[in-house]
Image: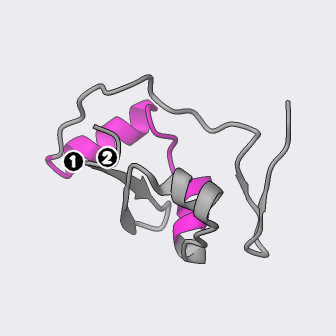
Amino acid sequence: MLGGSEIRVFSPRGQIYAAPTLIYHYINTHHYDPPEEFMRALYEGPAAGSREYFERLKGLGLEWTRTSSPATKTAWFRFEPQGSQQQTHV
């Protein structure tokens, strides 16, 4: 169920962040501004659905169950170091 679970975001520096599955909705619709550290980890860390992402989940003892297609990093959502999100259409 969307909103009833969490995602994990892995930083290349070792931090692990948890966020509700509705975080994109909160950002896009309600203009929530996540902490810069979280956004940097989202951009720099392994993409959800990648082999590295699943290996990191497994290392934490977390199971992944398919609720939809695995996400990929797309051009429409990118981290900008100044803290602003830029939407581009491809």
User: What residue sits right under mark 1 in the picture?
Assistant: 59
| Magenta stretch holds residue 47 | yes
Numbered mark located on residue 7 in the image: none
| Magenta stretch holds residue 70 | no
Looking at the picture, which amino acid does disc 2 mark? Arg
Looking at the picture, which amino acid does disc 1 mark? Gly
Q: Position of residue 49 (x, y in %)?
A: 43, 32
* Local secondary structure at mark 1: helix
Regarding residue 61, the answer to whether it shows in the image is yes
In this rendering, would 35 be left or right of 70?
Answer: right
Q: CA distance from mark 1 to mark 2?
A: 5 Å
Q: Is residue 69 above or below residue 13?
A: above
Report the span colored magenta. 38-61
Corner quadrant of residue 10 = bottom left
Q: Residue furthest front?
A: 30
Q: Which residue is drawn at the image coordinates 52% and 68% (left, top)?
A: 38
Corner quadrant of residue 40 = bottom right
User: What residue sits right under mark 2 in the picture?
Assistant: 56
Q: Which residue is drawn at the image coordinates 85% and 30% (left, top)?
A: 90
Q: Residue furthest right?
A: 89
